[in-house]
């Protein structure tokens, strides 16, 4: 089963890291990702720009375009990993592993994926 | 990153919101600072053991207020409040407060805090210093180093600024829409000036200066979270991000200025550029142009050019013309002249530059640009005079070194011609 591990944290905190702190945090997560990749379990990984760059489209007969994220929350969706896991238990283990390598607090939301199309981007 | 570094980052991130709440509560900057300090000390003691609270700002506000109340109660020899170790686990209290903070007042609270620091009655340097101290939480020592003054002088300057804003008596009622817009504009100006102070490199080490730029960007993002639909706030933040993206390419190993065209563009920070371009894109959708958006658009033209030769100078010239109409100023005309030189040559540019001589007779860049144009036209003697004036007006060793290099080049060229 594929799981999305969604990373939530305060972007004000993560955004206040220095370049060096940020790079160190990413490097630590890379170690876990390398391991997952060697096991053939790592799908796409994304890091999102701050929610200040977000635009929200309210669907409807007349769609409304709003500046800002979908919801104002204490912690924001900062990015996600797609990981192949045999069970929820393994997914939780993987998230814990990422959590130990993570330099911040916040939370990982573990969501089984219903549909996965890796897509093909022209590069 | 160690746990302590995380706490530092959380305290810094929560500071504007907590300080704004304390200011509303105590109606005094000094008391607000004391409450924040006390709450931070307790956080440093409590958080490593108990883990971080879900909402650090709400925790700090609750604990800071209680600490102040605590003092009052102790003086009255009454029962003390429960210790914050218990508090941090009382999720209900936190949630209630968090909800209270979420109402519309919270935005005006932070804007008021910013506006008090950026009060129009204060001179610009005091506005910047006060904002850095109160909102960003930089130490007096750090601020003093950024402004190249002694610590006690900076301490005095900040104390004086606090006294002046206390007397200015900014009302605590929610502002009218017009007042709100005015406050936002005043705050945006100071954020812009703070960035320029860091960017201009008029002194101090590059590291200290860069921190001013980073604080300005942080404030820009804060404003953007508070006023997420304001295109000028988007434009301002975009502008700062796009400018700051070039920071590591702007000075060489010896600290000498590297001109835009000579910069190693691989050193530009792609992530900041991408964020800046995304924000500009968002801003332009509103079709309500303003000076920050236009300046961001100019920075974006540079950011998009992979090589100097790819720069769309005609677009830059047009953008400067738009900016000139919005904010007529000889400095903007000077900038447009640089673009004109690229599009239509040095002669056309010089025609634009010459009439500015009166207004800009004390301006380093005027003589730098004029010298460069004269040099291009082969009027070496006049160029040498212009560069000489520029040298005398240089604001930093880096600027002086850059002009000296131009003069050296002139001297070399004439020697070569003579030989």
Image: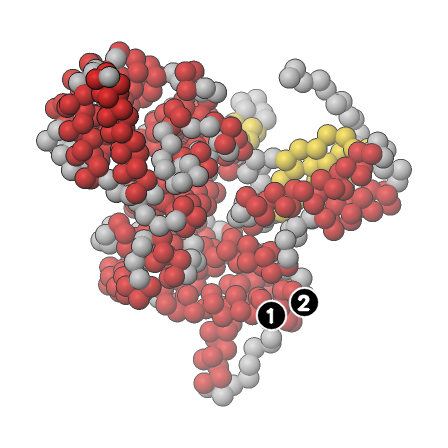
**Could you tell me which residue is drawn at 15 percent across and 29 percent down?**
B385
Residue B305 has which mark? none
User: Could you tell me which residue is drawn at 26 percent across and 18 percent down?
Assistant: B416
The foreground one among B404 and A105 is B404
Q: Which residue is mark 1?
A: B45
Q: Is residue B383 above or below residue A8?
A: above
Q: Which residue is mark 2?
A: B49
Visible residue check, residue B87: no
Residue A96 visible at all: yes
Say which quarter of the image contains residue B289: top left
Marks 2,1: beta carbons within 8 A: yes
**Which quadrant of the rendered structure holds the N terminus of chain A?**
top right
- Chain under numbered label 1: B
Task: Identify the residue shown where x is 71% and y is 43%.
Answer: A29
Q: Position of residue A22 (x, y in %)?
A: 59, 44
Q: Chain of mark 2?
A: B
In the rendered view, would you say B112 is above or below A28? below
Camera-side residue of A9 and B172 = A9
The image shows residue B154 at horizontal and vertical percentages of 30, 61
- The residue located at (33%, 20%) in the rendering is B316
Question: In the current view of this chain or complex, which residue is farthest to the right?
Answer: A86
In the figure, A74 relative to A66: above or below? below
Q: Secondary structure at mark 1?
A: helix
Callouts 2 and 1 in the same chain: yes
How crowded is the residue under tag 2: few (<14 C-alpha within 10 Å), some, or many (20+)? few
Q: Quadrant where the C terminus of chain A lies?
A: top right
> How far apart are the alpha carbons under marks 2 and 1?
8 Å
* Residue B193 placement, left or right of A111: left
Q: Is residue B178 left or right of residue A56?
A: left
Secondary structure type for disc 2: helix
Nearer to me, B156 or B351: B351
């Amino acid at each position: 089963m594929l799981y999305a591990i969604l990373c939530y944290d305060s972007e004000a905190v993560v955004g206040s890291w220095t370049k060096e702190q940020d790079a160190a945090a990413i490097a630590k997560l890379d170690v876990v990702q390398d391991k997952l990749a060697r096991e053939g379990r790592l799908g796409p990984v994304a890091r999102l720009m701050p929610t200040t760059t977000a635009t929200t489209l309210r669907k409807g007969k007349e769609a409304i375009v709003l500046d800002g994220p979908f919801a104002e929350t204490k912690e924001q969706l900062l990015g996600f990993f797609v990981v192949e896991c045999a069970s929820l238990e393994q997914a939780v283990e993987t998230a814990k592993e990422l959590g130990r390598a993570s330099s911040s607090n916040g939370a990982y939301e573990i969501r089984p994926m219903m549909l996965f199309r890796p897509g093909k981007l022209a590069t | 990153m160690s746990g302590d570094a995380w706490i530092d980052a959380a305290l810094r991130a929560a500071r504007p919101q907590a300080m704004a709440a304390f200011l509303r509560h105590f109606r005094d900057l000094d008391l607000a600072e004391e409450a924040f300090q006390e709450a931070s000390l307790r956080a440093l003691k409590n958080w490593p053991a108990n883990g971080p609270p879900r909402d650090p700002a709400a925790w700090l506000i609750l604990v800071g207020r209680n600490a102040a109340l605590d003092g009052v109660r102790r003086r009255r020899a009454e029962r003390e409040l429960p210790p914050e170790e218990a508090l941090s686990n009382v999720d209900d209290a936190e949630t209630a407060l968090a909800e209270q903070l979420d109402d519309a007042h919270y935005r005006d609270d932070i804007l008021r805090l910013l506006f008090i620091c950026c009060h129009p009655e204060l001179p610009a340097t005091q506005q910047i210093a006060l904002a850095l101290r109160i909102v960003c939480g930089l130490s007096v020592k750090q601020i003093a180093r950024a402004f190249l003054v002694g610590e006690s002088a900076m301490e005095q300057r900040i104390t004086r600024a606090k006294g002046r804003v206390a007397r200015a008596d900014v009302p605590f009622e929610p502002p009218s829409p017009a007042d709100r817009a005015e406050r936002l504009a005043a705050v945006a100006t100071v954020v812009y000036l703070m960035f320029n102070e860091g960017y201009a490199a008029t002194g101090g080490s590059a590291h200290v200066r860069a921190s001013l730029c980073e604080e300005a960007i942080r404030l820009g993002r804060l404003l953007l979270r508070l006023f997420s639909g304001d295109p000028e706030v988007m434009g301002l933040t975009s502008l700062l991000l796009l400018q700051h993206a070039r920071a590591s390419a702007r000075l060489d190993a010896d600290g000498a200025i590297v001109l835009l065209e000579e910069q190693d563009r691989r050193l530009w920070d792609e992530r900041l550029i991408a964020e800046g371009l995304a924000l500009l894109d968002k801003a332009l959708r509103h079709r309500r142009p303003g000076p920050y958006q236009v300046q961001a658009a100019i920075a974006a033209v540079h950011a998009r050019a992979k090589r100097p030769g790819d720069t769309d100078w005609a677009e830059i010239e047009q953008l400067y013309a738009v900016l000139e109409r919005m904010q007529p100023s000889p400095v903007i005309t000077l900038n447009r002249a640089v673009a004109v030189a690229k599009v239509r040559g040095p002669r056309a540019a010089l025609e634009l530059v010459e009439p500015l001589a009166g207004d800009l007779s004390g301006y380093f860049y005027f003589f730098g640009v004029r010298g460069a144009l004269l040099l291009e036209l082969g009027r070496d003697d006049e160029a040498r005079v212009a560069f000489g004036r520029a040298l005398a007006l240089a604001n930093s060793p880096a600027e002086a070194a850059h002009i000296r290099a131009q003069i050296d080049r002139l001297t070399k060229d004439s020697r070569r011609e003579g030989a």
